[in-house]
Image (cartoon, rainbow, N blue to C red):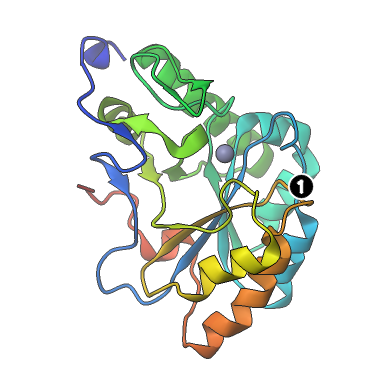
Amino acid sequence: MTEFGSRQPSAWGIDVPGVAMSLPAGTNPIALTFDCCGGPGGDSLDEALVSALRDTGTAATFFLAGRWVQANPAFTEQLAADPLFEIANHGTVHQPLSVSGASAYGIAGTSDAGAVYDEIMGAQELIEEFTGTRPAYFRSGTAHLDDVAAEITRSLGLLVVNFNRNGDDGGTLDAAAVTDRLVGMEAGDILLAHSNRPSSGTAAGVAAALPILRERGMSFARLSEVLPAESEQD
Ligand SMILES: [Zn+2]
């Protein structure tokens, strides 16, 4: 990481250079992505949400934090074994990805380029250990990062994927509000919602939205089906 050690970031947030916010123009499916963040209050799997996806044959991508994987090894293996689903990397301890210690929502980010490397690769190695597969996509804890951290992620062979549709505001919305967020999705959109909060409205809200989206002609894809991991983002 020495080549990044002296770099000063010029952008900070969810939508910075190098991050995919939606699928490539002309893509017909939408991508449902669900974060398993881990930590206090976030260490569960929303099994009702997973069942709603399975029962309807709905493809999705799960971003798993390393700390969540360590708390849920059996669920990690089950999600990875299901061909409907793809596993992606949500950071090792779920930190904003910063080369200068920037924070988001009061959560301290990584302190430097070496800590960025550790935050990415710790989860990468844990996920490979439990699933046998190295993820191709990364989303930081809180989805915040700087442009240098995005470059570091690319140099490690992962594409940073955020979202243009926020489905559940961190798993805090009731089911009707979640459904409202989903039903208007358009071709090529990427949804963020949370699969680690079984007491939230996310599962019921997603379950209600899926038939409405299908009625509108929408289809669903895992990220690797529709988003080339080697593509350049701007
Ligand atoms: Zn998260």
Looking at the rendered structure, the kind of residue marked 1 is Phe
Left or right of 7? Residue 80 is right
Q: State whether residue 104 is above or below residue 48.
A: above
Q: Is mark 1 within 8 Å of ligand 1?
A: no
Q: Whole-percent x and y of residue 232? A: 22, 48
Frontmost residue, 60 versus 106: 106
Figure quadrant of residue 50 = bottom right
Q: Secondary structure at mark 1?
A: helix
Give me the residue at 54% from left, 58% from top. Answer: 167
Q: Is residue 76 visible?
A: yes
Left or right of 177? Residue 140 is left
In which quadrant will I find the N terminus? Answer: top left
| Quadrant observed for ligand 1 in the rendered image | top right
Give me the residue at 56% from left, 29% from top. Answer: 94
Q: Whole-percent x and y of residue 65? A: 60, 35
The residue under label 1 is 75
Give me the residue at 58% from left, 55% from top. Answer: 168
